[in-house]
Image (cartoon, rainbow, N blue to C red):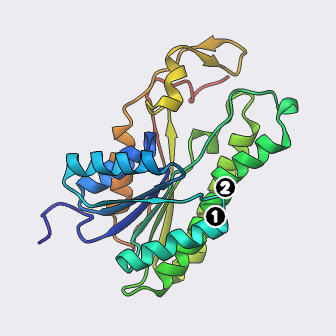
Amino acid sequence: MAVEGRSGEGKIALVTGGGTGIGRAIARALSREGYTVAITGRRAEILERAAGEIAAETGGALKAMRADIGDPVSVQALFREIENAFGRLDLLVNNAGMSLPSVPMEEITFEQWSTIVAANLTGAFLCTQQAMRLMKAQTPRGGRIINNGSISAQTPRPHSAPYTATKHAIAGLTKATALDGRPFDIACGQIDIGNAATDMTARMSVGVLQANGEIAAEPTMSVEHVGRAVVYMASLPLEANVLTMTVMATGMPLVGRG
């Protein structure tokens, strides 16, 4: 029986990079809304632990599915597993990604560049491709894809060329997916996140390089706000779409002159 007010009751969601940080917060928020949530990543033990802990907290159904989203064979196997386990997919959250330490552009190796592109861009494309195939074929057809763009999809930090380039590319992938998915009731939007408090952003409180060359601490916000924002985007009927949303710590130095 559906619980009144829970927008995800009876729906299936897949969150990439769902074992830690922002992905885990999104998976938790979706589970609270009644979604059956699959989380994927490369480290099976972390996924299993996260799935168990979230299920114990929310009472929801979670499934850990190990995959390397930068590998097309692994992604194809992941979506076969989704289809076999659930028969459909209502929501894909392309969250998985990685960054480098602050490195001047001329010092970035080809291997570093390739690794970031595979994790942040190729992975999102491969998962989107498979999700669209499934969403077009299922009954009822359609679904929603939400991409984690990051504030870096809008504005770079110093010495962040690979990460910034991939996140700007995610903005293009989001719009192309929204256009190509339109005839098939597939909506696609992007959430740009600024300074959510996770292990990856712990250095913010110590100090990070600013555009003027100074090192300064930056405010952060609870990662739970990101989960709530994704739930809102996902709760809309497929006739409506949040194409882009920015959720950021109010005091972070994004708006202004650098």
Q: Relative to 116, say whether 171 is above or below.
A: below
Residue at 60% across, 59% down: 69
Tell me the crowding category of disc 1: few under 14, some 14 to 19, or many 20 or more residues within 10 angstroms, Cα based. Answer: many
Task: Using the rendered image of the protein, determine whether residue 55 is visible from the camera's viewpoint.
Answer: yes
Residue 198 disc label: none
Q: Residue furthest front?
A: 45
| Residue 170 falls left or right of residue 226 | right
Where does the image place residue 242, in percent across and percent down from the top left? 45, 59
Hey, what amino acid is under mark 2? Leu
Where does the image place residue 251, in percent across and percent down from the top left? 46, 23
Asked whether disc 2 touches disc 1, contact meaning CB atoms under 8 Å apart, the reply is: yes
Where is residue 59, by image quadrant?
bottom left
Q: Which of the image's four quarters has the C terminus?
A: top right
Task: Using the rendered image of the protein, determine whether residue 229 is visible from the camera's viewpoint.
Answer: no
Q: Relative to 113, say whether 92 is above or below.
A: below
| Residue 60 falls left or right of residue 247 | left
Residue 125 disc label: 1
Residue at 45% across, 33% down: 196
- What distance separates the C-alpha of mark 2 from that of mark 1? 6 Å
Residue at 43% across, 62% down: 14
Residue 121 disc label: 2
Tell me the crowding category of disc 2: few under 14, some 14 to 19, or many 20 or more residues within 10 angstroms, Cα based. Answer: many
